[in-house]
Image (tube, rainbow, N blue to C red):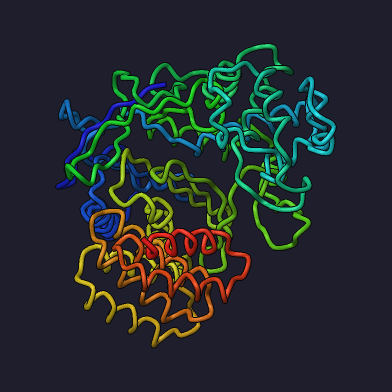
Amino acid sequence: MRVFLTVSLLFVLNLSFGQKNADKSTEQKIDHYIKEVIAINEIPGVALAVIKDGKIVYEKYFGKASIEDDKAVDKNTAFKIFSTTKLITNVGIFQLIEQGKLSLEDPILKYLENTPKEWQEVKIKNLLSHSSGLPDVVRFQEIPITAPLDEKIALLSQKPMDFKPGNQYRYNQTNYLFLAKIIEKIKGLPFEEYILQNQFPSVKSGVYFSSNFGETVPNSASRYNYDDQTKKYVKSTSNFGTDAHSANGLNISLPNFILWNENLDKAVYLQKETQFDMWKPFPFANNTDRFAFGWEIVPVNNVLSYGFTGGNETAFRKFIDRDLTIIFLSNGHKYSGLYVQSQVINHVASIVDKTLTDEFLLAGEKINQNFLKLDFTKSQQNYLAIKKNHPDWDFEYRLNVIGYTLMDHGRLHDGIKVLELNAKENPKSGNAFDSLADGYFRNNELALSKENYQKALSLSPDNNNAKEMLEKINTMLAK
């Protein structure tokens, strides 16, 4: 597990590498956009690549890999890609499927011992699609990250299933713990060795596994968390253990990730038919969730794209019908809850291919930026202007996230104003009033908090949080 990066809040552009067949105006537009993103979100370091029609049309490096050492991001910098690692694990699973050593329909009890009868319907396809319903191993503090597999299974067996396998999507780290152990059972070698041998056989440096974010490795980017008290980035020391390698442990440089994508496109890892099987939507029983076999499905202007994000800092996305792939790597975001990595992918896609211009997504990103960098009055005016032109566009979730982001970063009153706006815009949303009540509670406005929790509860009678908070507030008011 390894990390190391550096911060320069003034986003330092270091060097451009491997610029091939780039349209100058397109390059300049991406440059301007990504610098703005880095500045607004105060991102320490970034590496960005765009591959179109099999050619690298953009590859650049910005900022710092290590703030402490004043080391710039460059083509040798290995970034932690967090949950984007799951894409590499998925390819490893489908390689075994293609070889006939594994089937999507195999029950997990075929490979894992001492599993409870409640798990007997869980299959490989459910692990990949996050439809297993298994208890999530990271939710339980009593399950040590260093515990052997048998102990983890025994402890998880005591927890209830979340839902019937196949019914719905719920992101779950147990799924990838088990996928790694199934790979090891079939291949008889560590998960990390299997992946490196079968997907990075010729790579000498810039690719390794480590889920210890506090570990320092040469030419690697440190992972940073923003400290609102000191107004500075602090190097992360989180350690998720070796069992997390299949879920969040890959560290990789941008050129190596570009090479991985090239090998995927050229069917070096998987036959084309197998790749398309991997990208098929999983048939969830609830008929509402949308997710493939380990890949997120993201519509952009009605064009489907496939990929994943990690740590709110990295993203990999393929627009298959446009022969376009975008890779975004970074090592820290001040406003990590705003999903900057996904917005970058969507925005860069619109610059490279005009048919991928999604006005709703771009408007949402602009709303984020306005509330972060402008005063509330101006931001609200801009928001209302957008809504006036597009009254059907729903920004409830976005406003909620913005409100919490501002409150969590020392702008309590601005955050409350955004949540007030959200409740006004969505008068039938119990969640909007629940969030607004939370904002008032944080500001010690107990009467207003109580009033809005009551409103939230009237709109959503099953809201247990509102019930608990009302009891708490009544006790505080009584005192």
Q: Residue furthest top?
A: 188
> Residue sitting at 66 percent across and 49 percent down?
292
Quadrant containing the C terminus in the rendered view = bottom left
Depth check: 77 or 330 in front?
Answer: 330
Residue at the bottom extreme, as displayed? 388
Q: Residue at x 44, y 21 (%)?
A: 208
- Left or right of 224 in this view: 359: right
Left or right relative to 112: residue 86: left
Q: 449 and 276: which one is in front?
A: 449
User: With 319 as the anchor, is 4 left or right in this view?
Assistant: left
Image quadrant containing the N terminus: top left
Residue 401 vs 215, above or below: the answer is below
Work out whether 370 lies above or below 15.
Answer: below
x, y percent for residue 435:
43, 65
Quarter holding residue 197: top right
Residue 135 falls in image quadrant: top right
**Residue 119 placement (x, y as % from top left):** 80, 35
x and y percent of residue 98 in the render? 75, 31
Looking at this view, name the residue that lies furthest to the front: 479
Residue 8's place in the image compared with 27, above or below, is above
Q: Give how far across and how far down residue 327 sits, in percent.
A: 42, 44
Q: How many marks?
A: 0
At x 64% / y 29%, what residue is drawn? 92
